[in-house]
Image (cartoon, helix red, strand yellow):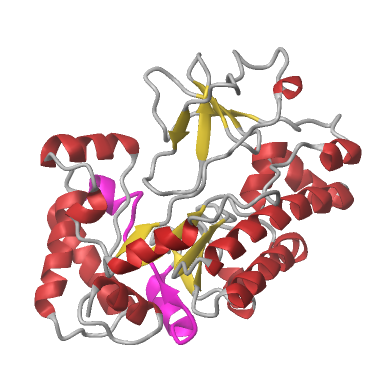
Amino acid sequence: MNHCECLLTALRHQEPDHVPYDIKLTAPKFNEFVQRTGATDPFAYFDLDYRYVPVMPPRILPDFSPYFQGRVPDWPDLNAPTLLQTSRPGAAGYFVMGEHNTAMNEWCEYRIYGEPIELNYHRKVHPLQGGSCTLTDVGCYPYPGLFAGDPYGGLAETVDHIHAERLAAVLSWEMTVFEKAWRIRGLEDPMMDFASNPEMAECLLDEVARRTGYLAMRYAQSGVDVIQLCDDIGSQNAMMSPRMWRRFLKPRLAKIIVDIKAANRQSLVCYHSDGKFAPVIPDLIEIGVDILNPIQPEAMDLAELKKQFGDRLCFWGGIGVQTTMPFGTPDDVRAAAHKVIADAGKAYPNRAAITRTLALNADTGST
């Protein structure tokens, strides 16, 4: 099997000839990777089965300065933008840099970085945060104009190029509905709106979901194999109210998945949430999710999830990124990888491929 066939075979509940694996590096680890290997492409270096489809950068940005008067050091020069792609190569999101370690994207998510700039850590300033925000403010907000023109014309060629290399094409669509909304409104305010101002909550979520759904649909049309929708809804020990999730987030996520599947029946939908969100896994299956990620062992039991849902879901992840990967020895990482294979997979015949997979993961985990 080639790389694309292997990954898609595994994700479709069939038996590949080697164990697909994944690796993501934070910005400091990426810099260390470059220093230690001399390579600049971890995907090629670790021979991963997929490549990310790059997300289109914004063409123009509205003047968001009225939202930040007196609140931030500066706002970027929109006439001569410098684009900064966020930490993971190919992951969704471009930011226009300001002069004082600041950055802003087309959704008006404003970030303030420390010195030196560390892409994984920053302080956010939310444009519609606070009790003075009204339904009119939410309705009149300058959301990205993603529907005019056709900035997605080159997507199919990009996907074709990835497929020509016998690789799977993956879109990582960070902050799909809930996270995008709280980037605009702040984390506490949308949660309060769910309880006391549902009309405002629904207005904001509808505007966000309409745009992110359209983008996901266009990427599916281009032939992307896996679309990763990302909304963190879980903490270490629990998740947001399942009742609130079902009322406000489930129907919008369901509409996005319907549009993806209508655009390309072959596209697989992966749902990412950190933390514990087991109560809504049956709901995610119901609305068409094919894959769950990252299945943190610190928060959920992979073996139990496999028993309950393994015939309907594929699991992408399972090794602790809070424990094993940053603090474990190479032997710890190997043992964790063996456990994931035992808990969530079958005994694959290609033992050499498994050994190679474990060795690569272990080398990375020791850095």
Q: Based on the displayed image, in which of its 4 quarters is residue 244 positioned?
A: bottom right
Q: In this view, does 193 lie to the left or right of 46?
A: right
Residue drawn where x is 29% and y is 71% of the image: 340
| Residue 145 screen position, x and y as percent | 71, 44
| Quarter of the figure with the N terminus | bottom left
Asked if the magenta segment contains residue 326, the reply would be yes
Label total for image: 0
Above-or-below relation of 258 to 40 = below
| Residue 47 screen position, x and y as percent | 20, 60
Above-or-below relation of 53 to 103 = below
- In front of the other: 142 or 287: 142
* Residue 318 in view: no
Asked if the magenta segment contains residue 26, the reply would be no
Q: In this view, does 184 lie to the left or right of 3?
A: right
Above-or-below relation of 290 to 273 = below
| Quarter of the figure with the C terminus | top left
* Residue 74 in view: yes
| Residue 258 screen position, x and y as percent | 66, 74
Residue drawn where x is 42% and y is 56% of the image: 53
Q: Based on the displayed image, in which of its 4 quarters is residue 221 positioned?
A: bottom right
Q: Based on the displayed image, in which of its 4 quarters is residue 34 positioned?
A: top left
| Residue 225 screen position, x and y as percent | 44, 70
The region drawn magenta spans: 301-329
Residue drawn where x is 24% and y is 47% of the image: 41
Above-or-below relation of 117 to 57 = above
Residue drawn where x is 76% and y is 21% of the image: 66
- In front of the other: 166 or 120: 166
